[in-house]
Amino acid sequence: MPKRVDHEARRTEIAEALWRIAGTRGLDGVSLREVAAEADISLGRLQHYFRTKDEMLLFALRHINSLAERRIRERLGAPAAGPDRGEDQDRGEDQDPDPEQGPGPSPRVVLRACLAGMLPLDEKSRVGALVGAAYFARAVHDERLCEEAREGIPRLAEFFAALLRGAQERGELAAGRALDPYTEAMLLISLVDGLTTYTLLGVQTGEEALARLDAHLERLFADAG
Amino acid sequence: MPKRVDHEARRTEIAEALWRIAGTRGLDGVSLREVAAEADISLGRLQHYFRTKDEMLLFALRHINSLAERRIRERLGAPAAGPDRGEDQDRGEDQDPDPEQGPGPSPRVVLRACLAGMLPLDEKSRVGALVGAAYFARAVHDERLCEEAREGIPRLAEFFAALLRGAQERGELAAGRALDPYTEAMLLISLVDGLTTYTLLGVQTGEEALARLDAHLERLFADAG
């Protein structure tokens, strides 16, 4: 048991070294040797934990996403509700959150917290977005790396769609045409992805990105009843 | 004059070699030497045209964007209207298109053609999106590369905002809350960016991406009057 913890701790330390590189000069062309140097361990030791750069990148991505998820849950004060963007070893409960239950925050509040939490508004989420950008650049040429998104994104979309259905049932969604929750969920995820891109590129500030996200949510939830 | 043409032709050939690499194994860690080999010229000759990988990447990105722009214009049969995502040496006229003028296609038709043209729906636009992804991965760590997006994206957003204002004046935009054209334009660009990401990753098909874009446009233009 302690051995397992040590193993995870060491993998996390290596992932953190990867994040530091992602947050500064980027991961383009970075070798395992350079990550080992940043983590202050030998290449052989690093390869004991990660055989390839992609394996390491996936671990780093999942871990940074699970930290982001935890931050969002804490902010909401609602441990059961949060996005599910990757594997999280210490989860296990609430695989299918029910946004209707209990006196917790409303679906809109949860949705907004999740989406805002995905934007690069502070240093932690900025590094997370940069790791995500490095993942994207490699995954478009690697079927196995794509799997992560092909499993994770529909799961996240389902989670958002459930929140939207909850809001719809409470009469909080914009009326007019009937909205398809899954379509709206994928639009929201795509929107946040694009807003993240243009924030990282300095086309807009984080505040502008958030204001634009809010404009979209306002339309989605406006004129209810 | 012929010399200038040769120069451009050679630069274009090199850019096309870069696209082929971007379309297959990707540009991560690719050297100038490898691009020279793909273009079937010597490294020295390539460096005569491009001193750095970034210089070459920018040229390739601008050129592929100008080709995409031309395809969209042709599809619309309206040479004056089209997105402006980068420098295009053989343009010069119509820097500020007036979406209100003439009997051409409606603002909605132009907007939809531009946005759909930005999605990776065929091989050419897929390669364009992959070059864009390679640009993004490098630009987040390079202030000078960011400049391209910091100039190009607001210009594209202004173009879309002008189309949206045109539609608004024609009473074609959704009523309800007053929409801010520039905000809506940035939302559209971000949306297409994210839809492109998830299409390249195989999370959704190109058809699904287009259907989701159309759902958003439908809402934007619905209930007019």
Image: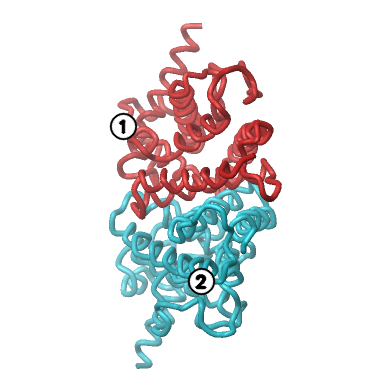
Chain colours: A red, B cyan
> Relative to A189, does residue A81 appear above or below in the rendering?
above
Q: Amino acid at mark 1?
A: Glu
Label 2: element kind: helix
> Relative to A220, does residue A167 appear above or below in the rendering?
above
Q: x, y percentage for residue B135?
A: 42, 57
Q: Which mark is residue B124?
A: none
Front residue of B38 and A220? A220
Cα separation, mark 2 vs mark 1, equals 54 Å
Q: Which mark is residue B166?
A: 2
Q: Amino acid at mark 2?
A: Gly
Mark 1 sits on what residue? A38
Q: Quadrant of residue A107?
A: top right
Q: Quadrant of residue A24?
A: top left
- In-image side of A1 versus B221 (left or right): left
Name the residue at 57% across, 18% down. Answer: A103
Name the residue at 41% across, 77% down. Answer: B96
Quadrant containing the N terminus of chain B in the rendered view: bottom left
Name the residue at 60% across, 39% down. Answer: A153
Q: x, y percentage for residue A126?
A: 37, 39
| Chain ID of residue with mark 2 | B
- In-image side of B156 versus A155 (left or right): left
